[in-house]
Amino acid sequence: MATLTEGLPLSLEDRFEGALKTARSTFQTGRTRALQWRIAQLNALKSMLDEHERAFCSALYLDLGKSHFEASYIELDNVRNSCDFFIKNLKKLLKPKSADVPWYMKRSTRAKVVAEPLGVVLIFSAWNYPLLLALDPLVAAIVAGNAIILKPAECAKSMCLILKQLLPQYLDDQAVQVLEATRQECAVLLCYKIDKIFCTASPRIGCIIMEAAAKHLTPVTLELGGKSPAIIDSTADISTAARRLAATKWLLNCGQTCIAPDYILVHSDVTSSFLEALKEALASFVSPLLLQNPNNDMEPEPDTQVMPCIFNQESLDRLQTLLDEVKDSIVFSLGETDKENLVMAPTILLDPPVESRIMQEEIFGPILPVPPVHSMEEALNFVRSRPQPLAVYMFTTNMELANEVVEKTSSGSVVINDVGAQFSLQSIPFGGVGESGMGSYHGRYGFDRFSHLKGVVTTEASRDDPIRYPPYTAKNKAILRACLRNRSMLDVILIKLGLKTF
């Protein structure tokens, strides 16, 4: 007999409970631990990207107005890069690593570190890079041997839909599941016991995630962003600095990027020349793109360069409010805001008030404040007086000063004479510190982040020294303490002979 609820869509609780139950039972079978399974998932993921590249790029255009090149180069290629790294290195990463033991234990004891998967991982993606920030941590979670529940950014509707459709076709759909949920519904997901949560979001969302995770002692990795500064020294190559800053700030997702420079501290000796170089670079890079309509229904051809749009009306209104509060500081803008098409013209501010919201909040848009400083010490003090950023960018030819920036500031990463280069490297950790996040990933750091590194000690039962058991004589106590503090073999021999005390 049919029930009243038959045929109705499942509630989020039902869907998540079902996904969680399936993921956990799949993990418990042990199949996600097999090297062959992990490699097969990576190859399948690459095939998905290759076979549906145009569809993914179209989704990114519809959601964010990204050109085919930006979508492919930044989002798809970085995921491919991660897959290639692990296909090449995973066998080595899975090999137990020998650990050293003190000299007095070497005859009978061996130690090693074994990486084991954590279990079921919940990944929250972000709207500004809805493919990359979903699949890059997914790759790391897969290679660590976990089962995964992926929650794509629901407001990037086109990408959310295509991930939901394609991932089950290519990956093991019992071990990797896609779950749609609104921002409000995410609170339901956080009520359940998960073995690991990975989230890319704002500091406010990070606090909510941590509070919920604490109830279950669930480990979290948070990628949160923040106000990343760039510092321009008087010795810097001004033209190169301007081009690299302009390209990263304005051409990559129209400034809606966590690693984008949020403000630039410029030595007063070169402020004028830097502003001119920045305007020139900005005009040459962006002016032709503003003629495009990035939010229409007609997707441009793959080789068409398109200026990305602001994500939604709420974001545009927020940015316009920030800009209106400091309009007297505007020294350059490439045009007017196009509210209908969500296009905001790249804008440069010179020395806006330090107490203004635009100097206090992460901008996440195409507005760039340029506060002059009279010394590099003033610049460093300015950076140190604020929350730790995701990155610090330093442009200088003075390597002593560059090293001083590394030593005297705290941030997720430091980049000298470039912007954003840290993200694509698999050889260094990517992540924040303090309010810009906790935990890092990319390359082996991603593998470690989704693994439990378990120490294993093996001792031969046949070698049993009675000195370790009571009753303890004065000599035995001295020998045990000498061994524990890793004194030399000669010291122990002298203690045994009664020629030395401890």
Image: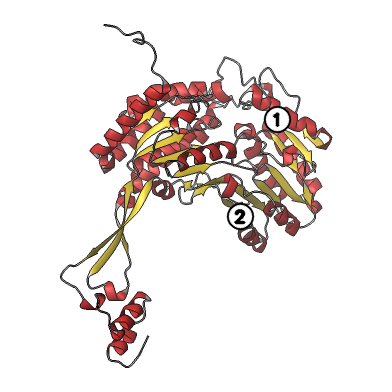
**Image position of 203 (left or right of 137):** right
Residue at point 35%, 75% (across, down): 484
- The residue that mark 1 highlights is 319
**C-beta proximity under 8 Å, tags 2 and 1:** no
Residue sticking out furthest to the top: 1
Q: Secondary structure at mark 1?
A: helix
- The residue that mark 2 highlights is 410
Residue at point 81%, 36% (across, down): 331
Q: Nearer the viewer, residue 370 or 456?
A: 456
Residue sticking out furthest to the right: 328
Residue 434 location, x and y as percent?
Answer: 58, 49
Residue 69 location, x and y as percent?
Answer: 54, 30
The answer, for residue 193, to whether it is visible in the render is yes
Q: Earlier in the sequence, mark 2 or mark 1?
A: 1
Q: Nearer the viewer, residue 118 or 92?
A: 118
- 320 is higher (above) or lower (below) than 267: above
- 87 is higher (above) or lower (below) than 57: below
Q: Between marks 2 and 1, how big is the CA–CA gap? A: 28 Å
Q: Nearer the viewer, residue 348 or 104?
A: 104
Q: The C terminus appears in which quarter of the rendering?
A: bottom left
Residue 210 location, x and y as percent?
Answer: 50, 41
Q: The N terminus appears in which quarter of the rendering?
A: top left
Q: Secondary structure at mark 2?
A: loop
Which residue type carries mark 2?
Ser
The answer, for residue 390, to whether it is visible in the render is no
Which residue type carries mark 1?
Leu
Count of labels in the image: 2
Residue 225 location, x and y as percent?
Answer: 59, 41
Q: Residue 71: give its label.
A: none
Identify the coloring.
secondary structure
Q: Which of the 4 quarters of the picture holds residue 298?
A: top right
Q: Which of the 4 quarters of the picture holds residue 244?
A: top right
